[in-house]
Structure formats: C-alpha cells, structure tokens
Amino acid sequence: MKIINVPNLLTLFRVGLIPVLVIIFYVPENTLSLTEKNILGTFIFSVAAITDWLDGYLARKLKQTSKFGAFLDPVADKLIVITALLLLLDLGRINLVIALIIIGREFTVSSLREWMAQLGKSQSIAVAFIGKLKTTAQMTAIIFLLYFENIGFIPIQKIGEILIYLAALLTVISMFYYLKISINAVKKM
C-alpha cells in the first residue's frame, strides 16, 4: 500500500495546521485583534477536526488504509488537541487540572495501545463508543473555547466550559474502560 495517498495527505495537512494555530494566537494585537484570533483559531481547529473525520472515512471508502496512516492519524489527533489545550490554558480559558486530565489520558491510552500491540492484542483495545463520545465532546468544547465570544444570546464561553468538564469526565471514564479491557485481555493470555 502506498504511503502517500489522500487520507495520509489530509493527516499531514492536519499536522501542518498546528504551527498555524499557535502563530495565530501569538501575533501582536496590532496585527490581529483578540476577536480575529478567536475566529481564525476556531476556523483552523475546526478544519483540523473535519480532516480528522474525513481522512478515516476516505481511507475506508477508497480502500487506502495503511500502517503509516494508522500510526500517523492518532498522533496528529493528539498533537492538535494537546496544542489547543495548551493554548487554552495559556489564554486562561481552561484550568490546569482539566488540561492535565485530558493530556494524561491521551498518553496513558496511547501507551496502553502500544503495549497491547506488542502483546498481539491490539484488537482488544480498539476505539469504543465511549472514546468517540469523549472525542466529540472534547473537539466541540475546544471549538467553543477557542471562539470564546457569545453569539447573540448564546453563551459560547459557558457552553464550552460545560463541555470541557464533560469531556474531562468522559476522558476518565474511557481511560478506565480501556484499562479494564486491557487487564482482562492480559489475564486471558
């Protein structure tokens, strides 16, 4: 299978968006206002979230799955999410505990998946519904917290805060779910 295909190019594009997202929030205020930074940052992260879904869909639809893509896609996802969380932390839009919970879970589950793959049990820790639900809440929360400004009577900031707490809760639940599955798979060896 070829390494360079449409899904992998989308994943590489997502990785390329990371420095763009960071730069947007650190250009001087006389270049971009905070509102403009919020809008551009939200747009960039939203594009990344869409390509996250799209690359997987296209890989399956076009039958262009590859070991490189299977490796790079979750790495790209974690990099863009961790970058956004660190930006939000620096902007004072999330607290340290929430960021640590989400980032810690990402490292824990990634390490767990690597360990299970080495044991030949990678299928036992495939993505579950709770993981997808966590990702949806997390991505939506980040989008709202990057935008951060109310739209008319819609309290975007408050919705984002509620969603990031929900994402943190789902993060912990999903981590324990994957740990339990892994322990059970190892016990059966």
Image: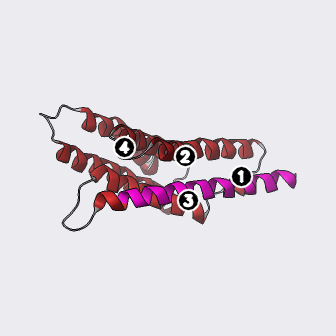
Q: Earlier in the sequence, mark 2 or mark 1?
A: 2
**Mark pair 3, 4: CA separation:** 19 Å
Q: Residue at x 63, y 43 (%)?
A: 108
Amino acid at circle 1: Leu
Q: Which residue is identified by label 4?
A: 88
Q: Earlier in the sequence, mark 3 or mark 4?
A: 4
**Mark pair 1, 3: CA separation:** 14 Å
Q: Position of residue 26 (x, y in %)?
A: 26, 33
Q: Which residue is identified by label 1?
A: 179
Q: Secondary structure at mark 4?
A: helix
Q: Secondary structure at mark 3?
A: helix
Q: Residue at x 52, y 47 (%)?
A: 102
Residue 161 lies in magenta, yes or no? yes
**Mark pair 2, 4: CA separation:** 14 Å
**Mark pair 1, 4: CA separation:** 28 Å
Which of the 4 image quadrants contains residue 13? Answer: top left
Q: Nearer the viewer, residue 127 or 29?
A: 29
The stretch in magenta equals 160-189
Q: Secondary structure at mark 2?
A: helix
Q: Which residue is identified by label 2?
A: 101
Amino acid at circle 2: Ile
| Contact? badges 2 and 1 (CB < 8 Å) | no
Amino acid at circle 3: Leu
Q: Position of residue 9 (x, y in %)?
A: 41, 45
Q: Which residue is identified by label 3?
A: 170
Q: Earlier in the sequence, mark 1 or mark 3?
A: 3
Which of the 4 image quadrants contains residue 34? Answer: top left
